[in-house]
Amino acid sequence: MSNNRKEYILEGLDCANCAAKIEKKVGEISGLQDASVNFVTKTLSFEVNHTEDTEGITSQIKNIVKKLEPDVKVKEKAARRSSKSSPAGQYESLKSNARHAHEGQCCSNHEHGEHEEHSHAHDHEEHSHAHDHNDHGHDHDDHGHDHEHGEGGKKELIKLVLGAAIFGIAVIFQFQTAVEFALFFISYLIVGGEVLLKAVKNIFRGQVFDENFLMTVATIGAFAIQEFPEGVAVMLFYQIGEYVQGIAVNRSRKSITELMDIRPDYANLRVGNDTKRVDPEEVAVGDLILVKPGERVPLDGKVVEGRSMVDTSALTGESVPREVETGNEVLSGFINKNGVLTVEVSKEFGDSTVTKILDLVQNASNRKAPTENFITKFARYYTPAVVIIAAALAVIPPLVMEGATFSEWLYRALVFLVISCPCALVISIPLGFFGGIGGASKRGVLVKGSNYLEALNNVDIVVFDKTGTLTKGVFKVTEIEAKNDFQNDELLEFAAYAESYSTHPIAVSILKEYGREIDQDQISSYNEIAGHGIKVNVKGREILAGNRKLMESEGISADLIDAAGTVVYLAADKKFAGHILISDEIKEDAKEAIAGLKQLGIKKTVMLTGDSRSIAEKVSRQLGLDEFHAELLPNQKVEEIEKLDQEKSKKGKLLFVGDGINDAPVLARADVGIAMGALGSDAAIEAADVVIMTDEPSKIVSGIKMAKRTRTIVWQNIIFAMVVKLIVLGLGAGGVATIWEAVFADVGVALIAVLNAARVLNVKDI
């Protein structure tokens, strides 16, 4: 985050439509830019000029929020050193908030103060127990997740049951008109009293077009035309819908945050011969920490003692455990499976991998997708437009149509009013995108913004760097071919002894392939011939190992080998013995990745490399790429990207995949830049729009599939909500639909849309 970027926590923010209003108003403050409210994480973020008065801006923000949502408290996000204010800590706070009743309701009408007090108490309790064992922590987290367990939730449920009981008595039994009216009215006040109160308050604050006002007008209108049962029933159904919708939003938030619940609770700090359980924030670089079986690695570091299997799935999405031993790097978020590890800490918690991942995922929703921005703007005009039409429906037909009664057309207008809140859209869409980003991260694909997630849907051309992206970037012996009665094992031994004094990557790869100890006593002479190779005497035999020039200079007839890689020619006692081919190995899933991209409809796959044409051609042919460009300098790669950019369709995107360090200019030039194998790499995380946490190109396919799944679900919600609302609007205007159908078109559709958005979290089949 840049120095001039500010973040505030909006405690008690539970209305997505209100979040959009706050975002719009804050964005109008002079000196601010890129204002964004993240409804899921309840954060307000923006860029501010260094010259601006921060205190004055904070005051303006608080005034805006107080006017729009009086029950929401604005708190500046503290420095990262506080565990509760770090990105990971915000996830803890959000997870804690998600436990309590009615957090996340659209246009909620309930008592925020009670929830917040309970939330803070619980949060404090959780923090005090954070140093217990992980399993205990999770049990504690699960306690009270259900909506009914919150005090406010119980209170609301009691009111709904009591109001429904009185309503039932009034409907079932026959009473005099005055008694019947009294029962309906009492029931109405119990169920909808808070809605009425909030509507009146909002009118005085200049907020007319909110759901409280609309429901108040609609139900009072029903009473005015003596539809008492319908007036109460509509308010009751609306409140029940809001209650259930609150549970659904709550569960979605909880599911999303639990998906990324990788923050370690504690670290076992080594102090002399003892260990002390401390908060990960308290551990410094160079300290030694102990990680026992079943515990999460709390900070990045190097193993200095012990051997174990670690589960990396929380960071990489890979289910197969990885073995680590002394000298290996381990990252925060890994789970130790069996052995005890002593780790020397290399990064403070604020700079650790787990914090960066949580930071990326949490802040990703601040970069809104075009669809989100469209819906926010649409909602701004849609509600007033429907209200104006409703007013016209109530007034104009009785004046101009013969036989039209005011009560009939007022009823039709009330139907319009009930439908006019766009909550189904403004709640479900941010939940859908945030869930998509969370789901992708669970698969080891970090998407830095909803805008990039949406852009992945429109990729036409995928351009790959070669080394480290499609290939492993590590030299390996890929071919041994002995000649003239020599054996392959014998040839490899000659090469290993010849290269035993060299540290060149080619020599290292030969020695690794040989895999046995070199007896230096067997080497009687060693002579390196510059630009040609090595002459060495091993066990009384003269061995030559080098390029073809070496063979020619020694008068040895050798076959010309045309292969993609480095060829080491070998001779023994002036007789050609054969050759060894050393090349950069293609990644196991690279071919599968290219095939997967083609299945997804990608029009062209291209490889750019600084390597030789022969090597590039072989790799391209093996992988089934459409095009390749070899022997390129970094600036020439940018030029090739510029040319390819001209080939994409009007709405198409160009995707570049590189290692994120050497390819920064190209990553920046592409529409979407993906950094490969960026686990723990600061440079890669900074350079790219999407970060693949493993070395697997197939994760790109997973990322695009996740983007397509998210888009499908988001558009399902948009189309479903709009079609239902338009149908009921039409039926309402024609006098066919009642307020019952209108309430379903509002609350019911919102609930279904939220539940549908939760499906994006299912990442098993991606």
Image (tube, rainbow, N blue to C red):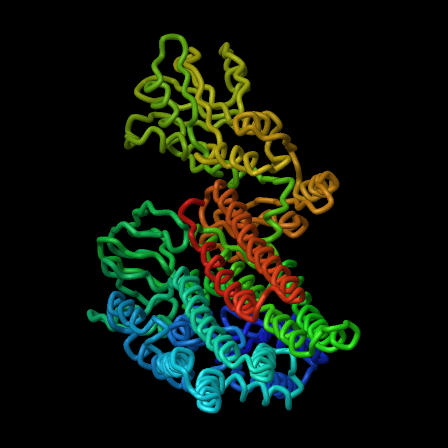
Q: Residue furthest top?
A: 484
Q: Quick check: can you spot residue 77?
A: no
Residue 233 vertical position relative to residue 259 in the rendered view, above or below: below
Which residue is depicted at the point 32% across and 52% down? Answer: 311
Q: Along the horizontal axis of the image, is 84 left or right of 109?
A: left
Work out which quarter of the rendered image holds the N terminus and state it: bottom right
Quarter of the image with the C terminus is top left
Examine the rendering and report whether any part of residue 257 can be seen: yes
Q: Nearer the viewer, residue 465 or 542?
A: 465
Residue at image location 48% in from the left, 84% down from the top:
188
Q: Position of residue 463 (x, y in %)?
A: 62, 40
Q: Quadrant of residue 503?
A: top left
Q: Estimate the x, y position of residue 593 in percent, counting from the top left.
A: 50, 37
Looking at the picture, how far across and down is residue 719, in whole percent?
A: 60, 55
Residue 401 is left or right of residue 561, and the answer is: right
Q: Residue at x 48, y 51 (%)?
A: 445
Q: From the viewer's perspective, is residue 519 above or below residue 668? A: above
The picture places residue 147, in percent across and down from the top left corner, at 37, 73
Q: Nearer the viewer, residue 759 or 199?
A: 199
177 over 471 or under it: above or below? below
Of residue 396 and residue 714, the one placed in the foreground of this image is 396
